[in-house]
Image (spheres, rainbow, N blue to C red):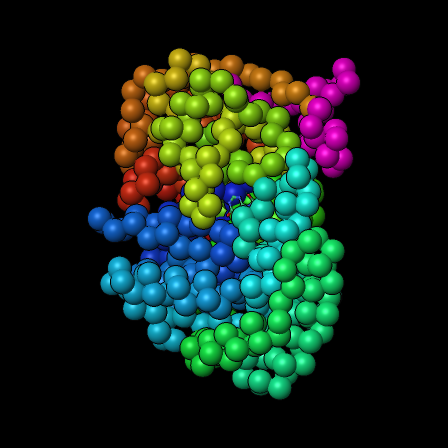
């Protein structure tokens, strides 16, 4: 029986929340392994809509949920989210949520640095979520991060903050921003520690026992491969790896434990923040897709940029990300369009390319080669079988499969959990 990792195959916001929720109901535990509260997963359960940022999607249904060591955790954001979900009737206790004791924390200073740096970049800004993700991962790699386990040791916090602020205050002053006094961070950390520590443990042990006991583990990714710090559109990326390999590193299991890798992608493309986007539509069709798809960021509320499906980019994401099957989402957003375009290659300086070049200046200059396909006038919204789909929609999906060299194993046709066509059970592979 396979474990399943769910990762984004585009620039995030592919609809992972719904797919993870759907799979979580069949898993024994759900593990988040990278990113932080820059992520936004929307789950629609009956008449309730949950907007999760840091909590793994399993918590809503009472499935044991784990925040792995690869995640950067803002303890205040986490407690706030636990509070909001609690008000919606889902009580989060250590019975349902465990946090890796070796995960690094996001502190208020990281957010201030994130925002000050973005401001200083001006027109060259990355368009980060301002949540402090980048600076927190930098501290982790620089070996000065405060981790969950440190919360149990006030003297360690004190000493670590000295080192951390030596670095960040110099940076903040250089950027013309207000530096932090130690007490501004230390006191709130001491206050929050007893509320976070009951959730902390060596999660790798729990995962090892689960694996040996034949339990099903669902690894829940955030963002998407084109935002991966190595394989994405660098520097317009997030600061973690979003590929399936990170599921192992970010939760403390070996690579063979990851199992099936389900890549989520929309039947078109969206992106929030700056950076190259070869198939972007700045016309009425792009606007229509954005309106119909309700393409506004869950975290920041920013309007997402929209464009045609880019098969070159998704094919590349599949190869570098280790994706074995695709869950295609939001097909219904394309209902009613007379014709559809799919990007099958790029032109660059008179040459045809079938990959996205690594250089940002080249990425910004590629122009898409399109294949045009007929659209459909019928609605695909809520379809639960292939037979319920118009022939043109099936053709569109089949052509995408060919171009990306990967099967569509799941098709999502509305935000509702059960409006899903399962071609192949990911847990059965
Ligand atoms: P950061 O992760 O806040 O540093 O932002 C870096 C880039 O990743 C920006 O372009 C963000 O818009 C983008 N980003 C971060 N998290 C998400 C997400 O969950 N969905 C989509 N884009 C994201």
Q: Nearer the viewer, residue 28 or 149?
A: 149
* Horizontal arrangement in the rendering, residue 36 relative to residue 290 (left or right): right
Residue at figure coordinates x 70%, y 53% from the top left: 175
* Image position, residue 141 (x, y; %): 71, 64
Residue at figure coordinates x 50%, y 74% from the top left: 188
* Image position, residue 129 (x, y; %): 54, 48
Image height check: is 26 above or below 426? below
Query: In this picture, which residue range is highlighted in magenta?
Result: 341-365
* Horizontal arrangement in the rendering, residue 52 relative to residue 12 (left or right): left
Image height check: is 123 above or below 28? above
Image height check: is 12 above or below 217? above
Residue at figure coordinates x 34%, y 69% from the top left: 92
Q: How many marks?
A: 0
Q: Nearer the viewer, residue 405 or 249?
A: 249
Residue at figure coordinates x 44%, y 65% from the top left: 78
Find out whether residue 342 is within the magenta segment: yes
- Answer yes or no: is residue 381 visible: yes
The answer to which quarter of the image holds residue 385 is top left
Outermost residue, left side? 47
Find out whether residue 201 is within the magenta segment: no
Image height check: is 7 above or below 151? above
* Image position, residue 38 (x, y; %): 51, 52
Q: Nearer the viewer, residue 36 or 120?
A: 120
- Answer yes or no: is residue 62 visible: no
* Horizontal arrangement in the rendering, residue 336 relative to residue 68 (left or right): left
* Image position, residue 150 (x, y; %): 59, 79
């Amino acid at each position: 029986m396979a474990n399943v990792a769910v990762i984004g195959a585009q620039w995030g916001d592919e609809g992972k929340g719904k797919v993870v929720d759907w799979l979580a109901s069949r898993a024994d535990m759900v593990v988040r392994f990278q990113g932080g509260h820059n992520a936004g997963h929307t789950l629609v359960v009956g008449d309730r809509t949950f907007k999760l940022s840091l909590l793994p999607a399993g918590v809503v249904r009472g499935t044991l949920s784990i925040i792995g060591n690869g995640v950067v955790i803002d303890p205040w954001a986490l407690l706030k989210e636990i509070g909001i979900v609690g008000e919606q009737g889902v009580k989060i206790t250590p019975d349902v949520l465990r946090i890796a004791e070796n995960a690094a924390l996001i502190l208020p200073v990281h957010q201030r640095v994130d925002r000050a740096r973005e401001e200083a970049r001006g027109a060259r800004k990355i368009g980060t979520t301002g949540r402090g993700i980048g600076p927190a991962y930098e501290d982790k790699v620089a070996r000065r991060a405060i981790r969950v386990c440190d919360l149990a040791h006030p003297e360690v916090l004190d000493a670590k903050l000295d080192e951390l602020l030596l670095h960040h205050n110099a940076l903040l002053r250089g950027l013309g921003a207000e530096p932090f006094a130690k007490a501004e961070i230390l006191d709130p950390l001491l206050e929050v520690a007893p509320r976070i520590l009951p959730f902390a443990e060596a999660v790798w042990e729990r995962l090892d026992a689960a694996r040996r006991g034949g339990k099903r583990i669902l690894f829940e990714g955030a963002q998407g491969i084109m935002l991966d710090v190595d394989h994405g559109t660098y520097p317009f990326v997030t600061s973690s790896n979003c590929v399936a390999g990170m599921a192992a590193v970010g939760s403390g299991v070996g690579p063979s434990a990851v199992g099936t890798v389900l890549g989520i992608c929309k039947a078109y493309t969206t992106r929030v923040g700056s950076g190259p986007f070869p198939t972007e539509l700045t016309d009425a069709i792009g606007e229509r897709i954005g309106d119909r798809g309700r393409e506004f960021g869950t975290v920041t509320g920013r309007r997402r940029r929209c464009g045609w499906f880019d098969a070159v980019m998704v094919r590349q994401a599949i190869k570098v990300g280790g994706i074995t099957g695709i869950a295609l989402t939001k097909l219904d957003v394309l209902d009613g369009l007379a014709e559809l375009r799919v990007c099958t290659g790029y032109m660059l300086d008179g040459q045809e390319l079938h990959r996205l070049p690594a250089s940002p200046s080249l990425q910004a200059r590629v122009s898409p080669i399109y294949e045009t396909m007929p659209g459909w006038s019928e609605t695909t919204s809520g379809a639960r079988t292939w037979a319920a789909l118009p022939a043109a929609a099936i053709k569109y999906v089949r052509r995408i499969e060919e171009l990306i060299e990967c099967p569509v194993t799941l098709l999502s046709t509305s935000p509702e959990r059960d409006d899903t066509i399962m071609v192949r059970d990911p847990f059965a592979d």
